[in-house]
Image (cartoon, rainbow, N blue to C red):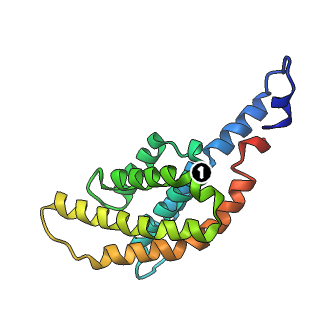
Amino acid sequence: MSGSDQRPGIRPRPTLGRRLDIAARRAFPVTCTIVLMLLTELPFGFAAQTALLPALTFGCVWFWSVYRPTAMPPPLVFLTGLLLDLLGYLPLGVGVLTLLCIHGAAVRWRRFLVQQGFAMTWLAFVPVAMLASALSWGLTALLGFRLIPAGPAAFQATLAAALYPALAIPLARAHRSVADPERA
């Protein structure tokens, strides 16, 4: 609770600047995720650059769903998944369902994970990333009516698990500063 919530009485209406600041802080998690998704589409020339898009998206959705679920509600996860489908050339609905499953797992285990350290959150993310990649692979094969190689899905899961610590450090700093509506 902030200090103003502890004092009863009439409170002045927040100024326009303060309301805009609060709105920007609440929108930061989704905006940050979308900006990272768009950055992965820039032509950097990496050999496995296409696997970065789902790997970073999985990590962002997991992180924000665990630490700030009100800023990453299911409708916004749905829209993020739709963008993942469009940017990743996936059949429509694959990214949506995958990200909603990641979000659901994160929200389900949130109370436990918030009390644990980073290592436990990361260890919980690894099987979720593996299952999400397997789900994405299975749905893509099913909707394409053909069997596709599982190697890229395994690489995607490994990349998501490996990149999560590097992704979580700046996201944790942002969580404590920029993305915190209480600091507005």
Evaluate whether residue 53 shows in this view: yes
Residue lying furthest top: 10
Q: Is residue 52 left or right of residue 33?
A: left
Image coordinates of residue 107 in percent, x first then y, are 51, 49
Tell me what residue is drawn at x 45 percent, y 40 percent.
75
Which residue in the protein does label 1 denote?
29
Q: Quadrant of the C terminus?
A: top right
Tell me what residue is drawn at x 34 percent, y 76 percent.
154
Tell me what residue is drawn at x 67 percent, y 61 percent.
172
Q: Is residue 73 left or right of residue 157?
A: right
Mark 1 surroundings within 10 Å by alpha-carbon count, few (fewer than 14), some (14 through 19), many (20 or more): many
Work out whether residue 124 or residue 85 is closer to the camera in this orientation and state it.
124
Residue lying furthest left: 145
Relative to 17, say whether 54 is above or below: below
Image coordinates of residue 114 in percent, x first then y, are 63, 56
Work out whether residue 144 or residue 121 is closer to the camera in this orientation and state it.
121
Q: Quadrant of the N terminus?
A: top right
**Which of the 4 quarters of the picture holds residue 170?**
bottom right
Image coordinates of residue 20 in percent, x first then y, are 71, 35
Relative to 125, say whether 32 is above or below: above
Evaluate whether residue 43 shows in this view: no
**Which of the 4 quarters of the picture holds residue 156?**
bottom left
Q: Is residue 8 left or right of residue 89?
A: right
Image coordinates of residue 104 in percent, x first then y, are 44, 50
Tally of numbered discs: 1
Tell me what residue is drawn at x 68 percent, y 55 percent.
175
Q: Is residue 102 left or right of residue 138?
A: right
Relative to 112, say whether 119 is above or below: below
Q: Secondary structure at mark 1?
A: helix
Please state which amino acid type lies under the numbered disc 1.
Answer: Pro
Work out whether residue 182 or residue 113 is closer to the camera in this orientation and state it.
113
